[in-house]
Amino acid sequence: MEELFRLAEERAELIDGIISDITSDLRIDCGEGCVYCCYGVPLWVRLIEAYHLLHALNSLPIRDRKEIASRLRVYRKEYESSAEREGYRPESPTAEESLDLGKLGLVCGLGMNEIPCPFLSEEGMCRVYKARPSMCRLTLFFDRSVCKRDWENPLSFIWSREIAPFIEEVRGRFRKRWSTELKRLQEKYPYLDLLRLEKEMIFLPYHLSLDPLKKTFKLKAFYSP
Ligand code: SF4
Ligand code: SF4
């Protein structure tokens, strides 16, 4: 398990390094504490990211862990109602390619746009910032006032015409670099099936639970090297 956490940390650092390279010619207004994009997020994460989050969550004070567990329950309830309304509720775990991101956008971005990510604190800070999944790392924009405007307007539906193409441009640049770096990372960790850890997606609120006695989060066993 320790090796899995090390891999997850290294992977996150690698992602940040690539992002910094590929956005060197762009102006980016994102940073810790800017959280207009932390509402109505689909908590579908890669398996490797789930382990990274698990590690970060269990390093938080017990009070935060209990609060997050209760907010995960609220989030899950809202997700289920919205998924039923939209008629889309994929099985979890599933392969990345089988997720319909457009429909997930309707379920979460539209149906839950006032629901904060359960990891957001009352003070408006991400409590798992260093372990945040790649969907958060790769949600970038050059003017937070535009994000604020969209966040204040529930009908703007996820991201406006200005924001979505920018994010797509950054993600396109990222994808070009990522497959090569992923191969290098796999060579460094030959005993871990990085491809599976990277491609398998899980809906976190279904698989993360707080042990009532130990007050630590656990993840249903998915991966054994
Ligand atoms: S995408 Fe927008 S809301 Fe999110 S961190 Fe960047 S500037 Fe802030
Ligand atoms: S994990 Fe953190 S950065 Fe990502 S949506 Fe949640 S609060 Fe925001």
Image (tube, rainbow, N blue to C red):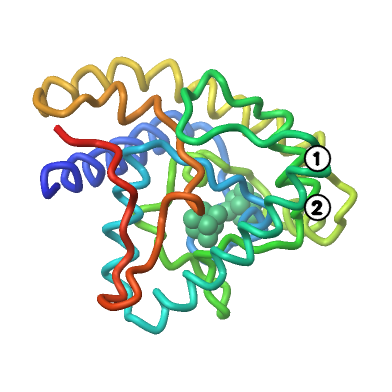
Q: Nearer the viewer, residue 14 or 69?
A: 69
Within the image, what quadrant is residue 151 found in?
bottom right
In the displayed structure, does residue 117 sit left or right of residue 24? right
Q: Residue at x 32, y 73 (%)?
A: 60
Q: Callout 1: helix, strand or loop?
A: loop
Q: Which residue is mark 1?
A: 160
Type of the residue with mark 1 = Ser
What is the x, y in percent for residue 12?
31, 42
Q: How many marks?
A: 2
In the displayed structure, does residue 164 sit left or right of residue 219? right
Q: Residue at x 51, y 43 (%)?
A: 203
Most extreme residue toward the bottom is: 63
Q: Reply above or below: 28 against 180.
A: below
Q: Quadrant of the C terminus?
A: top left
What is the x, y in percent for residue 23?
48, 34
Q: Nearer the viewer, residue 138 or 122?
A: 122
Q: Nearer the viewer, residue 172 or 106?
A: 106
Q: Residue at x 55, y 33 (%)?
A: 91
